[in-house]
Image (cartoon, rainbow, N blue to C red):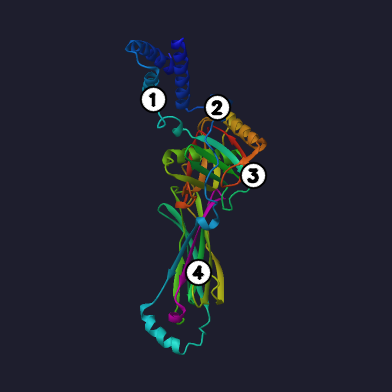
Amino acid sequence: MTPPAALLATAIPLMRRLRPMRLSRLGFVPLTLAVLTAVLPGDGHGQSDRPATFVAIPDAFPEIEARAVLVREPGVDLVLLKSDEASVDALAMALLLLADVREDHPVTATGQMVPITGFVVTHPPRGTRRQRLERMLDRLTEAPRVDLGSVGWGRRVRVR
Amino acid sequence: MYRSRLGRSLLAVVTALTGCSDGAPTGPARLDVTPDPAIHAPVLTMRDLTLLESVIQPSGQAEGLAAVAVEDDDGTRPLQQVINPRTRAGFDDGYAFAIGQHSYIGNVGLIRTSTHVSFRDQHVGSQTGQRQAYTPFLVDLGQLKDIAVWPKVYTDHTCGLTAQGDSSHKAWWQFYQGRGAPEWGVDEVPSQAAPVAQGSCTNQTGTRTGSEERSGGFICSYFITYDLDTGEIVDAQLLYCSTQGGEVL
């Protein structure tokens, strides 16, 4: 039985028992919500651990010596690639570093920027993983231009 | 009627809450429900990634001398000069470095040095440091001074890297500090360090040993934190180079 179904199976008989107590609907619904809120995982274990991840190619890449830049804000991880260097290797290395940064530096009250000045790929992605990255880049080049915020406009796709 | 309506409501609440706690997107529709991805990051420039240091070097003894100098100071000074400009690169425990230094005559000295790191003959990162020293014009009296800067590139690698460095050495005269202050006698000299290699990695063959699950390589990056409201940089860590590996997605 899946967790939601198990929860329903427990909660509905409980609610039936409560009916003879003549709880008003106004009192009943908040009680149900309170129970569910207490039982189900909150933000600490849910979405905040898995921020939405985007890859973007800004029209104007920051004027710094960098081949890619990671930007992290609460709920959002963004990989900025240079238009002329948006390769599978660059994307793979940026995503690998992103995973490491996520682990070492949880986003708190400040934003995070990680300019990647250079890399050398020693173990390139292969097989299905490489194909997924290639599809990602294909989607990115075909994506419409959107407002990326302080870095201006550019193409962006969500990858996770 | 009441029960079934309540059941549907409860089901909707449960579905919504469990959907949120899952974390993994379930399909294309889920991708549309995202936080606003318009970011507030600062627009970085190379100046943000350069170590800047400016120092004033007042000389306690010179203050007395300055009073004498002012009386018959006709505004001239000995010729400005950059002496013995040099850059040396190397490795120390946990970092690569380049030291740029020179001696100079003039009341302002500036040195700008970059440490460059390469891996397998590919450039992976540079850290630039700049230091400017100012001695008040009236107390300088043409003293010979030294200036140096040594930007570091931190790394946990003990083999396979090569460090290089270059510097721009500068000295001049200036009446007072500030933008638009008149300068004269600018002398600027470059220097370059010979490359220094860590040595090859004998225990790393560079061949694949795992399945397609693991990818990886060597990567250099800065780590900067910024205020989400103003975009101002709160903290910036120096360039760090390390090996990354794992599952890409």
Whether residue B67 can be seen here? yes
Disc 3 target residue: A83
Q: CA distance from mark 4 to mark 3?
A: 36 Å
Which residues are the magenta region? B118-140
Q: Secondary structure at mark 3?
A: helix
Give the residue type at disc 4: Leu
In-front residue for pair B204/B115: B115
Q: Residue at x 44, y 72 (%)?
A: B146
Check disc 2 and report the residue beneath it.
B30
Asked if badge 2 and badge 3 are on a common chain, one would say no
What residue type is disc 2 on?
Arg
> Label 3 lies in what chain?
A
Residue B110: mark: 4
Q: Are marks 1 and 2 in contact (CB under 8 Å)?
A: no
Q: Residues within 10 Å of mark 1 (few under 14, many from 20)?
A: few
Q: CA distance from mark 1 to mark 2?
A: 22 Å
Is disc 2 in the same subunit as disc 4? yes
Depth check, mark 1 against mark 4: the one in front is 1
Chain letter for mark 1, please: A
Q: Nearer the viewer, mark 1 or mark 3?
A: 1
SS at circle 4: strand
Secondary structure mostly seen in the magenta stretch: strand
Circle 1: element type: helix
Viewer-side label of 2, 3:
2
Q: Earlier in the sequence, mark 1 or mark 3?
A: 1
Query: Which mark lies nearer to you, 1 or 2?
Result: 1
